[in-house]
Amino acid sequence: MPTTPLISGYGLQRHYRRGIETVRALDGVDLEIRAGESLAVIGPSGSGKTTLLNVLAGLDAPTGGQLTIGGQRVDGLSEQQLTTVRRGFFGFVFQNFHLIPTLTVAENIVLPLLFLRRPVVRHEVEQVLEAVGLSHRAHHYPRELSGGQMQRVAVGRALIVRPRVLVADEPTGNLDTVTADAIVSLFLTLVNREGLALLLSTHNLELASRCDRIIRLKDGQIVPPVSPPQSLR
């Protein structure tokens, strides 16, 4: 495992005003993420899980602390600069699939390449379709797919940019137990095979326990213990 983290954050804060109060969505988080490892973030609703993922992935700027992505200090950068840093470095998978209903599976998967103005290479698309188990569904539309298959399309869309970090925010929240387990298995296979880092937020302790590391958030802070997976089994 490389000595240099893909992402490192020290004393990360994300505070904002809500009326007369200050909301401390993140309140001093230290965290490192390296290639080839999977990290699960757990905690109750409102604990800061989504905020943490958004900050670590450059979707939201920290209001305090130090953040490094891909060896570059990014705290203090503008939104435009953050967009440049995260472009192609991250692949995103969310709870809602966000598929375009009028596009086929293959067309949905290549959408990020069009936004990034990258060429669509047929054999690379075929590799992604195979990786997510949808080669036989390439020309189907979302309405012809199950929920699990639609989430696999979303995973494929994240992978097509060849990211170094896969960010999955509650990606199994709309799936049944068997399908959710299959999606997490797919994530972990990709981590092991492609050397990606996985940053996963979930309410499901059983799924979290399959990751290399687990952190618990409460009120915007990591609370002890920073548990090995066995502690939740």
Image (cartoon, rainbow, N blue to C red):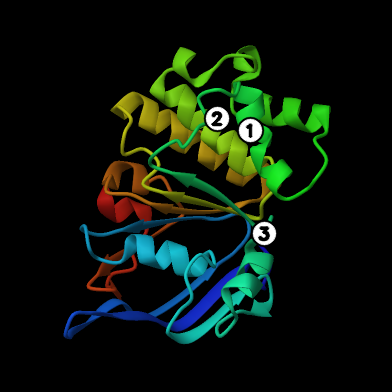
Q: Secondary structure at mark 3?
A: loop
34 vs 124: above or below: below
| Chain-order first, disc 2 or disc 1 | 1
Q: Is residue 218 left or right of residue 77?
A: left
Are dots 3 and 2 in contact, CB under 8 Å?
no
Q: Mark 2 and 1 residues: CB-CB less than 8 Å, in contact? A: yes
Q: Is residue 226 left or right of residue 106?
A: left
Q: How far is the residue under mark 2 from the one under mark 1?
A: 6 Å
What's the residue at 33%, 30% (across, down)?
A: 175
**Residue 8 x, y percent position in the rendering:** 55, 75
Question: Is residue 5 or residue 70 the one in the foreground?
Answer: 70
Q: Secondary structure at mark 1?
A: helix
- For residue 155, what is the image quadrant? top right
Residue beneath disc 3? 87
The three-letter amino acid code for the residue at tag 1 is Ile
The amino acid on which the numbered mark 2 sits, given as a three-letter code, is Val
What crowding class fits label 3: few (fewer than 14 Cα within 10 Å), some (14-19), or many (20 or more)?
some
Q: Position of residue 89 (x, y in %)?
A: 66, 58
Q: Quadrant of residue 128?
A: top right
Q: Which quadrant: the N terminus?
A: bottom right
Q: Which of disc 1 and disc 3 is earlier in sequence?
A: 3
Residue 161 visible in the shown view: no
Indicate the amino acid at tag 3.
Arg
Q: Which residue is mark 2?
A: 153
Q: Is residue 15 left or right of residue 182?
A: left
In the picture shown, does residue 231 fall above or below 128?
Answer: below
Q: Position of residue 191 (x, y in %)?
A: 59, 46
Residue at 17 percent of width and 84 percent of height = 21
Query: Circle 1 is placed at which residue position?
Result: 109
